[in-house]
């Protein structure tokens, strides 16, 4: 591969994925392999009185049955707060919590044995209302109480008054990342008491460190290798089957595979926090924001996961990408006995965007102003101050993004209603109507609406969390030609990171043969594939390692063939400033191998002040705006999104086609939350843990995306790039809901929007 | 678990008689989901895919007799002109892959209240043919469904075919789902006009413990059409009559609140679908006369 940054080379994993040849983690196999299964709690909240494994152990084919007593090291794990049992001990706090493990010679034997593990529970009344979790009479689910984190932001004049005030309450349902690949992996014990785990994850090293603690092994005895990842979106940041498979493998001395079924996957990972957001916006008659007051309550469910960071984002960006001189934000994330929530694409900024964008439309209506014009009057720009006091550096083209989507041509208007007589008159294309092929309308009741939204979030970790990545780059000559090998632990989760790493190495070293090695823990941490950060941080590490290699190559050239200022690497050779080949790399290097490892650390961030919420807490900001055009059948409450248009500043598109893929896929995930995707929880129990009833958008639901990709650079990031993965998921849904409001005239304060929210039955 | 693979219908009946708990499987689009979700662990499967006669169809005394193993894809392709309502319903079943495997026989066997084929079978008064080693019996579709996932089959019986008249007039099928394809019905409605008999047939899906008809709505709209001799001199039906027809369809349902929708919404949606699909069918009839 000789594609450089800015090119869109074909990704190596593309053809095998399309052909069905790509090995995902659920396809792993090993000789003598056993299958693991998990015994899960049928209750959202219960005390465990006894666990009887006798019958399960007696089943033919069963080699191990483990409970918390078999966990040799740390019994609790968690990304930020270690509060989640590897296997439940005295109490279960959510439906589906892991209680025991089975290893057997056949997956069916393992499942049957799991059913034979007899757990005696004393069922407790679950705490399922997050509002109640804030009160003193609620049961304390964890030793520190039920408030996982409270974030308080006080910015500007707390007594500011405004000419025009609008209020609103908004509710966000629980979305699932729904990666098509279930939680799965293969643990292989070695002969020295260690274990190799092949697993689909977003962060090999944080898994490794947690596993070492749980297994009571030194980190070098727990080796992880990335297996084929079938989507992640935040769902693979926490441990799922990792510790369980390793425990079973170490106990049985045989390779153990675990692969969740689809229903199990719904309890195998955290979800997007459902939330309730109460807002008050005050503005001048000219449409300048005076203040925003927001109360944000997120339901974190039974365990903390990354809740404390999610609530920080939900609060820091509560106002949206606008200049707002005064703000009062109070945000809580609480423990309940609902399914645990954590990271999902957009990470706190999705929930608040629904609220602040609905408020901006409400404010525009109160002022009699065009909603896009109102947004532009308040648009954040370079040098603006966030409500956390941080000054926005780098590009912040909020007004320009809005201008661009506003100016894009609109799709052709609704075709006339399919009236007329006879069979021939019914020439309607059902795929172009709400309800689709289900034949619910031939045009009757269909009204078009257009809505706008703009959103932003940070790229990278925040609040002082050490954000870095490591890359090892090795240059050698293979069969007379130079080859660069890039080794990082960064997880390719489908976003195209492998391709991007190769493009960076090809660009920096001028070599055409670049091999990106499999990600594993034999190299330093890359941090997670999340927070839209990998191209920035691991891309930065690859660039730094390449630069170090290049420096040595040029120094070698200098000493071998003499100097030429301005020499560079290009076309597998050292080239003079005049573009003449001075020496080929093959000749220069011979048998020599040049290898450099570099860590790349972006600027440090700082923790929010606990009283004021002020701090330079974030690294970089990424912005996107969306326009949605929808057709709504106002009699049946069915919606068809006709078109999404977006403008996004990506700083610099390292791989433009991959950027387009992120913009489309992210918008589809935003559409899902807007109109169909919701985990329905009743009394702590998930009622739709399947793809039959947890609906994801199909190709008939997801319209074409009209895109305008801006490359405005960033003074601090490698190549001036910005993270791109999350912004498409933030404002796409709010734009759709704004369009539904425009079509129906209804307030619509809850997502996903259900048919009965539109027809009011 | 045993996997029984009869090669002939006679053999299948004998196996079913010998293994009454064996679960018949054709396309597997329902059965395998049940198995994968661990909702069923039958002692044996009875694989019906090798029996050639189940995948055939033909005329039987003026009726179409369609083998239980005919897939939705073939129904659409081969019988769409004669059974337009059933073909429209088939078009809403799952994805192309599911329609290539799934069968109406399987839909009847599962007897889900949400089965997409059921409302059109009810609207056109189809008959289900059941067989065992003891003989064959034919049951009207409306007597076949007994409760959620319960039907009138005896343990030793298999579904052999269904019989239905080729469409006597315009037919419609309409289904609400919260996705524009590949979705289980929140509720559905089927309509069949039979001009010669001056009859209107209805079928309601996913809004009662079983698929049901709306006889009062049928009698009402037949009355409206008869009163003004509209079958002979077709004219637009008054809006008030259409609204009433919708209300009566909604009243025939016994919906519940569940994960797919609320009872109130289901009633509302049925009324809208009934009104709209009657207009579509009636306009088609008016254009054809």
Image (cartoon, coloured by chain):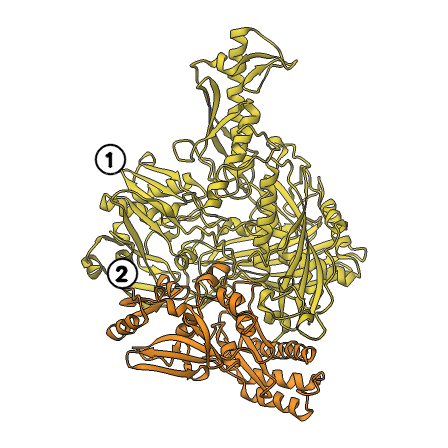
Chain colours: A yellow, B orange
Residue at image coords 69%, 86%: B240
Q: Is residue A744 visible?
A: yes
Q: Which residue is mark 2?
A: A112
Subunit under mark 1: A
Task: Single out the mark in the foreground, 1 or 2.
Answer: 2
Question: What is the number of callouts on the image?
Answer: 2
Q: Residues within 10 Å of mark 1 (few under 14, many from 20)?
A: few
Q: Are marks 1 and 2 on the same chain?
A: yes
* Towards the viewer: A324 or A171: A171
Q: Is residue A616 visible?
A: no
Q: Which residue is mark 1?
A: A192
Q: Position of residue A359 (x, y in %)?
A: 69, 59
B269 over A685 or under it: above or below:
below
**Left or right: A427, with A344 as reference point:** right
* Towards the viewer: A207 or B141: B141
Q: Position of residue B37 (x, y in %)?
A: 37, 63
* Towards the viewer: B171 or B142: B171
Alpha carbon separation for disc pair 1 and 2 = 32 Å
Residue at image coords 66%, 83%: B242
In the structure shown, which secondary structural element does the residue marked by tag 1 occupy?
loop
Subunit under mark 2: A
Q: Residues within 10 Å of mark 2 (few under 14, many from 20)?
A: some
B119 over A641 or under it: above or below:
below
**Left or right: A421, with A6 as reference point:** right
């Amino acid at each position: 591969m000789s594609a450089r940054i800015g090119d869109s080379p074909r990704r190596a994993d593309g053809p095998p994925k399309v052909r069905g040849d790509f090995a995902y983690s659920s396809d792993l196999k090993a000789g003598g392999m056993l299958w693991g299964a998990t015994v899960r709690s049928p209750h959202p909240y219960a005390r465990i009185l006894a666990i009887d494994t006798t019958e399960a152990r007696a089943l033919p084919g069963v080699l191990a049955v483990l409970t918390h007593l078999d966990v040799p090291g740390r019994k609790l794990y968690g990304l930020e707060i270690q509060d989640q049992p590897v296997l439940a001990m005295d109490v279960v706090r959510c439906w589906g919590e892991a209680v025991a493990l089975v290893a057997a010679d056949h997956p069916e034997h393992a499942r049957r044995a799991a059913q034979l593990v007899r757990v005696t529970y004393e069922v407790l009344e679950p705490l399922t209302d997050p509002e109640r979790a804030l009160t003193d009479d609620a049961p304390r689910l964890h030793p520190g109480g039920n408030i996982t984190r409270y974030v308080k932001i006080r910015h500007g004049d707390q007594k500011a008054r405004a000419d025009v005030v609008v209020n609103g309450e908004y509710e966000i349902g629980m979305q699932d990342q729904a990666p098509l690949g279930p939680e799965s992996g293969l643990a292989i014990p070695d002969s020295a008491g260690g274990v190799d785990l092949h697993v689909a994850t977003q962060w090999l090293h944080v898994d490794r460190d947690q596993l070492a603690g749980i297994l009571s092994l030194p980190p070098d005895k727990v080796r992880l290798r990335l297996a084929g990842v079938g989507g992640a979106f935040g769902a693979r940041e926490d441990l799922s089957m990792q510790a369980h498979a390793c425990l079973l493998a170490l106990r049985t001395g045989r390779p153990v595979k675990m692969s969740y079924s689809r229903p199990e996957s719904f309890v195998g990972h955290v979800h997007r926090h459902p939330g309730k957001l109460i807002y008050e916006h005050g503005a001048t008659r000219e449409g300048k924001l005076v203040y925003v007051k927001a109360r944000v309550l997120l339901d974190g469910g039974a365990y903390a996961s990354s809740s404390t960071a999610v609530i920080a984002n939900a609060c820091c960006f509560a106002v949206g990408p606008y200049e707002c001189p005064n703000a009062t934000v109070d945000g809580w994330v609480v423990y309940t006995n609902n399914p645990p929530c954590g990271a999902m694409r957009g990470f706190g900024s999705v929930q608040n965007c629904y609220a602040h964008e609905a408020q901006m439309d409400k404010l525009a209506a109160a002022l009699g102003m065009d909603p896009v014009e109102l947004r532009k009057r308040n648009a954040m720009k370079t040098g603006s101050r966030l409500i956390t006091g941080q000054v926005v550096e780098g590009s912040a083209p909020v007004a320009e993004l809005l201008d661009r989507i506003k100016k894009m041509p609109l799709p052709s208007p609704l075709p006339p209603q399919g009236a007329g007589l006879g069979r021939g008159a019914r020439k309607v294309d059902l795929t172009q109507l709400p309800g689709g092929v289900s034949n619910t309308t031939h045009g009757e009741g269909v009204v078009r609406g257009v809505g706008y939204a703009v959103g932003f979030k940070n790229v990278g970790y925040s609040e002082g969390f050490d954000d870095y990545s490591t890359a090892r780059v090795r240059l050698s000559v293979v069969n007379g030609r130079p080859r660069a090998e890039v080794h990082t632990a960064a997880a390719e989760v489908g976003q195209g990171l492998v391709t991007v790493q190769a493009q960076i190495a090809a660009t920096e070293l001028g070599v055409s043969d670049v091999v990106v090695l499999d990600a594993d823990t034999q190299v330093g941490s890359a941090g997670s594939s999340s927070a839209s950060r990998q191209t920035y941080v691991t891309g930065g590490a690859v660039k730094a390692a390449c630069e170090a290699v290049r420096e040595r190559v040029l120094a070698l050239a200098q000493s071998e063939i003499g100097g030429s200022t301005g020499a560079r690497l290009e076309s597998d050779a050292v080239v003079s400033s005049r573009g003449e080949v001075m020496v080929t790399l093959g000749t220069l290097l011979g048998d020599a191998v040049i290898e450099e490892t570099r860590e790349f650390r972006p600027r440090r961030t700082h923790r929010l002040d606990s009283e004021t919420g002020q701090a330079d807490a974030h690294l970089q900001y990424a912005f996107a705006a969306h326009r949605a055009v929808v057709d709504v059948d106002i009699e049946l409450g069915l919606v068809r999104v006709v078109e999404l248009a977006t403008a996004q500043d990506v700083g610099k598109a390292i791989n433009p086609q991959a950027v387009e893929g992120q913009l489309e896929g992210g918008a589809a995930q935003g559409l899902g939350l807007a109109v169909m995707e919701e985990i329905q929880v009743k009394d702590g129990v998930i009622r739709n843990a399947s793809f039959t009833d947890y609906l994801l958008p199909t190709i008939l639901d997801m319209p074409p995306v009209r895109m305008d990709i801006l490359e405005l650079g960033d003074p601090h990031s490698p190549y001036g790039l910005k993270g791109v993965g999350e912004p498409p998921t933030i404002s796409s849904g709010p734009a759709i809901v704004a369009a539904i409001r425009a079509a129906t005239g209804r307030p619509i304060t809850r997502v996903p929007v259900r048919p009965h929210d539109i027809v009011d039955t | 678990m045993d996997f029984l693979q009869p090669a002939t219908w006679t053999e299948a009946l004998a196996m079913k008689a010998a293994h009454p708990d064996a679960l018949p499987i054709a396309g597997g689009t329902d059965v395998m989901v049940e198995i994968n979700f661990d909702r069923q662990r039958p002692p044996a499967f009875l694989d019906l895919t090798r029996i050639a006669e189940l995948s055939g169809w033909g005329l039987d005394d003026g009726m179409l007799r369609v083998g239980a193993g005919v897939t939705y894809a073939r129904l659409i392709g081969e019988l769409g002109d004669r059974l337009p309502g059933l073909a429209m319903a088939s078009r809403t079943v799952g994805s192309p892959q599911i329609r290539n495997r799934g069968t109406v026989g399987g839909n009847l066997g599962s007897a889900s209240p949400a089965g997409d084929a059921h409302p059109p079978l009810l609207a056109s008064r189809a008959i289900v043919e059941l067989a065992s080693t003891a003989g064959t019996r034919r049951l009207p579709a409306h007597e076949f469904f007994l409760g959620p996932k319960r039907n009138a089959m005896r343990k030793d019986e298999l579904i052999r075919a269904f019989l239905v008249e080729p469409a006597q007039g315009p037919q419609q099928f309409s289904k609400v789902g919260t996705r524009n394809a590949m979705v289980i019905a929140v509720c559905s409605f089927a309509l069949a006009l039979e001009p010669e008999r001056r009859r209107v047939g209805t079928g309601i899906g996913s809004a009662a413990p079983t698929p049901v008809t709306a006889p009062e709505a049928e009698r009402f709209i037949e009355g409206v059409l008869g009163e003004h001799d509209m079958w002979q001199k077709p004219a637009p039906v008054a809006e008030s009559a259409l609204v009433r027809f919708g209300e009566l369809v909604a009243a025939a349902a016994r919906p519940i609140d569940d994960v797919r929708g609320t009872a109130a919404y289901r009633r509302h949606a049925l009324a809208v679908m009934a009104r709209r699909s009657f207009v579509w069918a009636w306009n088609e009839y008016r254009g054809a006369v």
